[in-house]
C-alpha cells in the first residue's frame, strides 16, 4: 500500500504509521510539499516507489468492498487499462460513517446510496461487461483504475505539468490509448463507495484542458516531465 500524499500535514503521517504498525502488508508514505493541487506529480512519486507489477489507483475518499482488489485482478491483462466506477454516498450517510468511526459493511441494500446499480456485485455480469475493450474517454477517473506498471512507465506516467484540479487522468489515459492500450470497464465488481465532500476549485481547468487537447491532437505517447523525474531512466525505458 502506497499513500500518495500531496502535501498533507503531520496528522496524516501519524495515521499512515498507525496503519503500518497494524498490518503485515508493507505500507509506504509517499509525501511531497504542498505547492498547490498536484495530483499528477503525487501519483508519479508513488508509482516510482511501487515494486509490484500491477497498480490499482484509488482516492483517499473511497470505502472499498472486501473483494475490490480480487475483482480488479480477475480482468487484469497487459495492455489493458481497467476503469472501475464508484457508488456515490449522500452527505448524511457520509457524516454517519465519519461519526461512527468504524467502516460499516456497505452493499446495494444500504441506505444513503446514489447510483445504486453501481453497488451491485455479480461476477457473471462483470465478466460480460469487461470482455470488450474500447478507447472511450467518457467517465475516466483515477479513483478506481488499474493497469500494469510497465504500461504506465511506457508512457512516462502522469504529466507533472498538470497543476490544479482536472484532466491529468484523462491526459494520461489518452497517451495510453495512443500507445495501443484499450480500456476495459469494471462493472458489477470492484465496488468502491465515494464519501461525499465539497468539490475542489476548478480554476485551472482552462490550462489543463489545453494540455489535454495538445496530447490528443498531436497523438502524444510520452510526456516530457513524468515518472522519469523520480525514477531511473533505465527502468522507465524498460531496460
Image (spheres, rainbow, N blue to C red):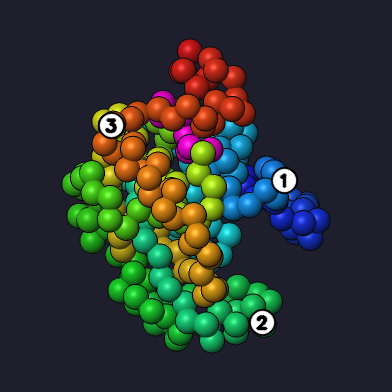
Q: Nearer the viewer, residue 176 or 167?
A: 167
The image position of residue 145, as x and y in percent, is 41, 50
Q: Are marks 3 and 1 in contact (CB under 8 Å)?
A: no
Q: Are marks 1 and 2 in contact (CB under 8 Å)?
A: no
Q: Residue at x 60, y 84 (%)?
A: 96
Alpha carbon of mark 1 to alpha carbon of mark 2: how far? 31 Å
* Residue that mark 2 sits on: 100
> Relative to 126, is 54 on the left or the right?
right
> How many residues crowd mark 1 within 10 Å: few (<14), some (14–19), many (20+)?
few
> Relative to 130, is 161 on the left or the right?
right
Q: Residue at x 33, y 30 (%)?
A: 220
Q: Which mark is residue 140?
A: none
Alpha carbon of mark 3 to alpha carbon of mark 2: how far? 48 Å
Does the segment drawn in magenta span residue 154?
Answer: yes
Q: Is disc 3 placed on a helix, strand or loop?
A: loop
Q: Which mark is residue 219?
A: 3
Alpha carbon of mark 3 to alpha carbon of mark 1: how far? 32 Å
The image position of residue 165, as x and y in percent, is 50, 56
Q: Residue at x 28, y 50 (%)?
A: 137
Q: Are marks 3 and 2 in contact (CB under 8 Å)?
A: no
Q: Residue at x 59, y 32 (%)?
A: 48
> How many residues crowd mark 2 within 10 Å: few (<14), some (14–19), many (20+)?
few
The image position of residue 75, as x and y in percent, is 32, 45
Instruction: Tell me which segment is drawn in magenta.
Output: 153-160
* Residue that mark 1 sits on: 33
Q: Quadrant of residue 155?
A: top left
Which badge, 1 or 2, comes first in the chain's sequence?
1
> How many residues crowd mark 3 within 10 Å: few (<14), some (14–19), many (20+)?
some
Reply above or below: 152 against 100.
above
Q: Nearer the viewer, residue 35 or 176?
A: 35
The image position of residue 67, as x and y in percent, is 45, 59
Which badge, 3 or 2, comes first in the chain's sequence?
2
Amino acid at each position: 500500500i502506497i499513500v500518495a500524499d500531496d502535501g498533507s500535514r503531520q496528522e496524516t503521517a501519524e495515521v499512515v504509521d498507525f496503519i503500518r504498525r497494524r498490518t503485515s502488508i508493507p505500507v509506504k508514505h509517499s509525501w511531497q510539499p504542498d505547492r498547490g493541487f498536484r495530483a499528477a506529480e503525487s501519483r508519479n512519486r508513488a508509482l516510482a516507489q511501487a515494486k509490484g507489477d500491477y497498480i490499482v489507483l484509488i482516492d483517499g475518499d473511497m470505502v472499498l468492498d472486501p473483494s475490490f482488489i480480487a475483482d480488479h485482478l480477475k480482468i487484469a491483462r497487459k495492455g489493458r487499462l481497467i476503469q472501475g466506477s464508484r457508488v456515490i454516498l449522500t452527505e448524511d450517510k457520509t457524516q454517519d460513517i465519519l461519526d461512527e468511526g468504524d467502516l460499516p459493511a456497505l452493499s446495494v441494500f444500504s441506505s444513503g446510496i446514489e447510483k445504486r446499480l453501481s453497488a451491485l456485485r455479480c461476477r457473471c455480469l462483470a465478466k460480460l461487461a469487461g470482455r470488450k475493450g474500447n478507447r472511450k474517454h467518457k467517465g475516466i477517473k483515477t479513483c478506481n483504475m488499474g493497469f500494469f506498471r510497465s504500461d504506465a512507465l511506457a508512457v512516462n506516467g502522469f504529466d507533472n505539468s498538470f497543476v490544479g484540479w482536472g484532466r491529468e487522468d484523462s491526459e494520461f489515459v489518452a497517451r495510453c490509448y495512443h500507445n495501443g492500450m484499450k480500456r476495459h470497464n469494471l462493472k458489477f465488481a470492484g465496488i468502491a463507495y465515494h464519501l461525499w465532500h465539497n468539490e475542489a476549485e476548478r480554476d485551472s481547468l482552462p490550462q489543463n484542458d489545453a494540455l489535454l487537447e495538445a496530447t490528443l491532437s498531436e497523438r502524444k505517447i510520452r510526456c516530457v516531465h513524468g515518472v522519469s523525474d523520480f525514477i531511473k531512466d533505465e527502468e522507465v525505458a524498460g531496460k
